[in-house]
Image (cartoon, rainbow, N blue to C red):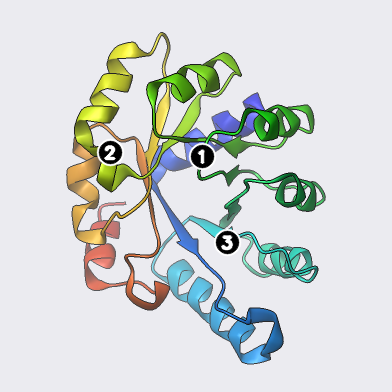
Amino acid sequence: MEIKQNNLIKSLRIQPLIVVIRLEDNFFNLSQKKENLLFKIEKFSNIGIKNIEIAWDSNPEWVNLILEIKKKFKSINIGVASISSRQSLESILSLDLNYSMSPFFNKEIHLKAIKYNQLVIPGISNIENFKEAINLGYKIVKIFPASKLGINFISELKDLKKKDIFFIGAGGIKSNNLEKLLKSGYDALVIGRELRNQTPDKDLEIWLNDY
């Protein structure tokens, strides 16, 4: 897991952004929805996005979908969002993912993930979970929901840390606030729901010009 953490940190220092794409309702019932998803990923790839997470889904076809995306978009660092149960964790074991994320801290899930060398970045919303995550060996944590926890929370965590921790902000982040949040203490950010139709907007494209 240490190597995966170091590799992701290295990638995010070059471009400190992860785009999350969530599957549409009834995704696996209509082939057009898969085409829409691939088109969205291609649009993000074309404007220079390097890291994309696809939300986990319980449908048995989901694993094949991720394998297809990884094969088609080799220049994208593909990860998975919403790993928060044993079922979701077990479903990613065969995917050879560089990273995935959980919306919250679940010690049982993270211990299992570490056992299987799966990088499941914990979502942190309080100091107690932050300390536990560090004790488990995490160098990367996700502050969630960042928009509600505010800048004071990450400042408090930075005061507490005993070693270098890479902070990713997620939840309610808008593309026109990326630079402001990065200057406020986050090392990288996750954006998804705030992008209309989960597609690039002008503010995101302007920001990417610096990377």
Callouts 2 and 1 close, C-beta under 8 Å: no
Residue at position x 48%, y 24% in the image: 129
Q: How far apart are marks 2 and 1 (CA)?
A: 14 Å
Residue 73: name its quadrant: bottom right
Give the amino acid at mark 3: Ile
Q: Earlier in the sequence, mark 3 or mark 1?
A: 3
Which residue does the image show at 71% across and 28% down from the upper left? 114
**Picture quadrant where residue 43 is located:** bottom left
Relative horizontal placement of residue 122, taking residue 208 as reference (left or right): right
Up-down: is 195 above or below 143? Answer: below
Above or below, 184 against 200 in this view is: above
The reply, left or right, for residue 107 in relation to residue 187 is right
Label 3: element kind:
strand
**Residue 54's disc number:** 3
Amino acid type assigned to the residue bearing label 2 in the image: Leu
In which quadrant will I find the N terminus?
A: top right
Residue at 75 percent of width and 47 percent of height: 96
Question: Relative to the observer, which residue lies in front, 160 or 126?
Answer: 126
Q: Position of residue 186 (x, y in %)?
A: 30, 35
Q: Which mark is residue 149?
A: 2
Q: Which residue is drawn at 39% across and 21% down?
A: 127
Q: How crowded is mark 1: few (under 14 residues within 10 Å), some or many (20 or more)?
A: many
Element carrying mark 2? helix
Q: Name the residue under label 1.
A: 104
